[in-house]
Image: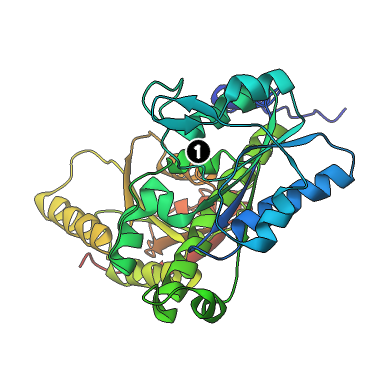
């Protein structure tokens, strides 16, 4: 009788899956409209979403609004019930208690990066959102790229300005849905005030926002995979893994991976599985290649494992790699009944493209 092979679940993966399921059990969903610049219409899209949900019979309120002076936007806002803000000291804050008492299905919240006045229950509005979500309230919000903390340096290089307030990228990545409000740069430029951003700056901001949105979608995809126990290494971005050793050349392989990373707006990783008893020349070659990889913008990881191939494959699956770049040195000493390491890797790299680079002496 044929035997069945059972694969033992990975304990760490099971733990992450359980944590993902528990965290999303009674938690409200978050949808964010992301603008790459002011006046792209993200607030309008948010309120239009609220109206559509009302038409579908959902209970919708506005918890925080931005009075921009747009007649069209004000007409839409007046069709949705608004929870009045709470007076705190010399300022106003979103009234979290009133919203929780009202218990709507959906709450619209603009200006997610707004800093609350001193004396508020939370320092920032995005923290108010987290409390609402924890209570099961679904939130639809809006924010511009310039307010995402980890994107502020890049935005400042383009615009010469830096927003005073911010939200952590982790908050945005926690969204269940992200919609980028993608308006052509020249259209935004025509409707902007004199002295505002130029078309070239707007185009650069748009590209930056598209890349960030892809990162957020990657996080959402990973959560979906965790929830459904999916281990396959597919994703929305190319994730290229370069495997180097101290005994072979690596520059051509690293250069090729860097070009592919730039072409696909992907991410580049370089790994080396530690080996004992290296010669001084090999150590110097390894350090030079790792240094060069960092100069190319790669994320370098030093791994440990008794079986280098199994160690590399485990890392590749964990990090959802889409391409593997490996060097291949022809050696006559492999016995015909023993698979070469490269052959083992190719056979086991399911869901990943493998590129072989002929290697000679170390350079």
Between residue 88 and residue 121, name the one nearer to us: 88
x 42%, y 32%: residue: 91
249 in relation to 153, above or below:
below
Q: Quadrant of residue 246?
A: bottom left
Q: Horizontally, is 1 left or right of 350 in the view?
A: right
Write down the residue under mark 1. 171
x 55%, y 48%: residue: 66
Q: Horizontally, is 44 left or right of 319 in the view?
A: right
x 34%, y 35%: residue: 304
Query: Quick one: quadrant of the N terminus?
Result: top right
x 24%, y 67%: residue: 361
Q: Horizontally, is 27 left or right of 313 in the view?
A: right
Q: Is residue 187 visible?
A: yes
Q: Position of residue 28 (x, y in %)?
A: 68, 29
262 in relation to 164, above or below:
below
Q: Quadrant of residue 80?
A: top right
Q: Position of residue 157 (x, y in %)?
A: 29, 65
Query: Quick one: quadrant of the C terminus?
Result: bottom left
Residue occupying the far left of the picture: 280
């Amino acid at each position: 009788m044929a035997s069945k092979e059972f694969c033992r679940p990975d304990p760490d993966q099971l733990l992450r899956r359980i944590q993902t399921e528990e965290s999303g059990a009674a938690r409200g969903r978050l949808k964010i409209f992301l603008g790459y610049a002011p006046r792209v219409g993200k607030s309008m899209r948010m309120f239009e979403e609220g109206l559509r949900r009302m038409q579908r019979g959902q209970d919708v309120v506005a918890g925080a609004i931005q009075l921009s002076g747009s007649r069209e936007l004000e007409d839409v806002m007046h069709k949705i019930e608004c929870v009045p803000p709470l007076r705190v000291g010399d300022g106003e804050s979103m009234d979290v208690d009133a919203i929780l008492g009202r218990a709507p299905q959906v709450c619209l919240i603009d200006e997610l990066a707004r800093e609350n006045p001193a004396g508020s229950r939370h320092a920032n509005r995005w923290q108010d959102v987290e409390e609402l979500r924890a209570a099961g309230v679904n939130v639809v919000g809006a924010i511009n790229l310039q307010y995402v903390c980890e994107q502020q340096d890049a935005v400042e290089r383009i615009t010469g300005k830096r927003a005073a307030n911010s939200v952590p990228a982790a908050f945005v990545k926690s969204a269940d849905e992200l919609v980028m409000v993608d308006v052509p740069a020249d259209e935004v430029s025509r409707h902007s005030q004199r002295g505002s951003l130029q078309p070239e700056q707007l185009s650069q901001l748009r590209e930056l926002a598209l890349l960030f949105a892809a990162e957020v979608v990657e996080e959402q995809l990973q959560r979906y995979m965790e929830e459904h126990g999916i281990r396959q290494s597919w994703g929305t971005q190319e994730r290229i893994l370069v495997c180097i050793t101290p005994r072979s050349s690596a520059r051509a392989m690293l250069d090729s991976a860097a070009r592919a990373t730039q072409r696909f707006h992907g991410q580049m990783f370089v790994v080396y599985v530690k080996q004992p008893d290296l010669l001084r020349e090999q150590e110097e070659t390894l350090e030079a290649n790792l240094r060069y990889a960092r100069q190319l913008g790669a994320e370098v990881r030093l791994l440990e494992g008794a079986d280098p191939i199994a160690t590399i494959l485990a890392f590749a699956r964990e990090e959802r790699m889409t391409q593997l770049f490996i060097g291949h040195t022809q050696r006559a000493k492999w016995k015909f009944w023993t698979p070469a390491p490269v052959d083992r890797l190719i056979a086991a790299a399911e869901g990943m493209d493998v590129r072989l680079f002929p290697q000679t002496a170390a350079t």
